[in-house]
Image: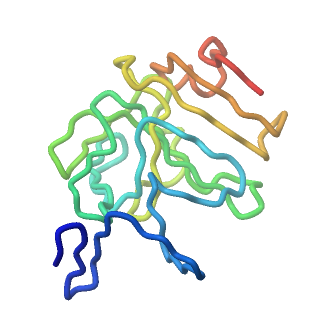
Amino acid sequence: GGSNWQITGAGAGELESLKVRGSLSVYELILNRLHYQNGGLIIGAGGGKLASATGSAGSETITIEDPVGGGAMPFAVGMIVLVQDFDLNRTSIVKKIVRQVASISAPDIVLTTTAGWTTAKDAGTLAAGDEMVAIGDTTGTYDSSLYMSAVDTDNPFLRIYDGVTTYGKWDTTDKTTIKVQI
C-alpha cells in the first residue's frame, strides 16, 4: 500500500500516473471500451457486454459485465438498446435484437419490447457475451447516437442521430432524426 499507489497481493494495482518507456502488452484496455471494428460502429449513451440473460423474448432480465467491480450501471430506464451481429463476411445477420429498458434493480436490467420492433423480427436470442448499445431513449434524455460504417449502403459514412425516441427513428425509416451525415 501507499498514499498515491497500491498493489494488492492478488495483483490489482492503482497508480496516480504511469510512464512506460518500453513496450506495454495489454489483454484488455477499458476506456469506455476500445475495439477494432470490422463493419459498423455505434457510439451511444450506454453499452456493455451481457454477463447473463434470462426470460422469454420481449421480457428478458439481463446483467452487464462489470470488469472492475465498481457497480456501474450503463443503461437507464427508457433506453432503446440493440444487439446486432453479422457473419464474418457480412452477408447475413446472425443476431439482431432491439429492446427497451423497462426497469433497473441493480445488477438486473429488465427489458421489454419497444415501438417499431416486435419479437417476430428477432434474429437469435440474448445470451452471455452479447454486446449491447443504446441507440435512443423513449424519454428523450439519451436520444442521440453516432453510427459509423464502412460496409452499409452508401459507405463509408458517419451518421449523427438526435431525437431517436422509437426504433423507426433510428433505422432510417424516419430520416428526421439524422442531423448530419458525412
The residue under the point 77% across, 54% down is 91
77 or 58: nearer the viewer: 77
11 or 121: nearer the viewer: 11
164 or 20: nearer the viewer: 20
In the image, residue 146 lies at what x, y percent? Answer: 59, 33
**Residue 99 in the figure: left or right of residue 69:** right
67 or 17: nearer the viewer: 17
In the image, residue 181 lies at what x, y percent? Answer: 73, 24
The residue under the point 37% across, 58% down is 50
Give the vertical position of 133 relative to 88 (above or below): above
In the image, residue 17 lies at what x, y percent? Answer: 38, 64
Give the vertical position of 29 relative to 96 (above or below): below
**Residue 105 in the figure: left or right of residue 148:** left
Give the vertical position of 26 relative to 58 (above or below): below
The residue under the point 63% across, 36% down is 147
Q: Quadrant of the C terminus?
A: top right
The residue under the point 75% across, 55% down is 90
The quarter holding residue 143 reads top left
